[in-house]
Amino acid sequence: MDLQSARVRKLIGLFGILAFLVAYAVIVATAGDYVPKHWAAQMIYYVVAGTAWGVPILPLISWMNRGR
């Protein structure tokens, strides 16, 4: 299997993104139990956690789209 093929990179990236998102969701939900029960603290935590998942995935997406 040629790892330089765009189709193979996208397939690997698909499974990488899915695995990361499952792990990220478990970690965020578990850590969310330790956030104070005040509505403002929970809102800030979940807004940040809900948008922060994209940052670690950017290099993988960049790798997947290389050589198009």
Image (tube, rainbow, N blue to C red):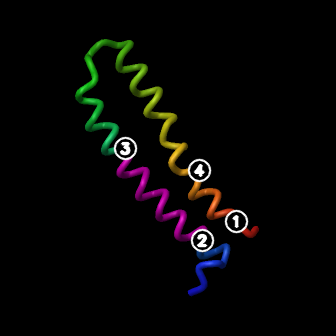
- Looking at the image, which residue sits at the far left? 34
Residue type highlighted by circle 2:
Arg
Question: Closer to the N terminus: mark 3 or mark 2?
Answer: 2
Q: Which SS does the magenta portion mostly show?
A: helix
Residue type highlighted by circle 4:
Leu
- Callout 1 crowding tier (Cα within 10 Å): few <14, some 14–19, many ≥20: few
- Callout 4 crowding tier (Cα within 10 Å): few <14, some 14–19, many ≥20: few
The magenta segment? 9-24
Q: Are marks 3 and 2 in contact (CB under 8 Å)?
A: no
Q: Residue at x 28, y 23 (%)?
A: 35
Q: CA distance from mark 1 to mark 3?
A: 27 Å
Q: Residue at x 53, y 63 (%)?
A: 14
**Residue under label 1:** 66
Q: Residue at x 29, y 30 (%)?
A: 32
**Residue under label 4:** 58
Q: Is residue 1 above or below residue 44?
A: below
Q: Are marks 1 and 2 in contact (CB under 8 Å)?
A: yes
**Residue under label 3:** 25
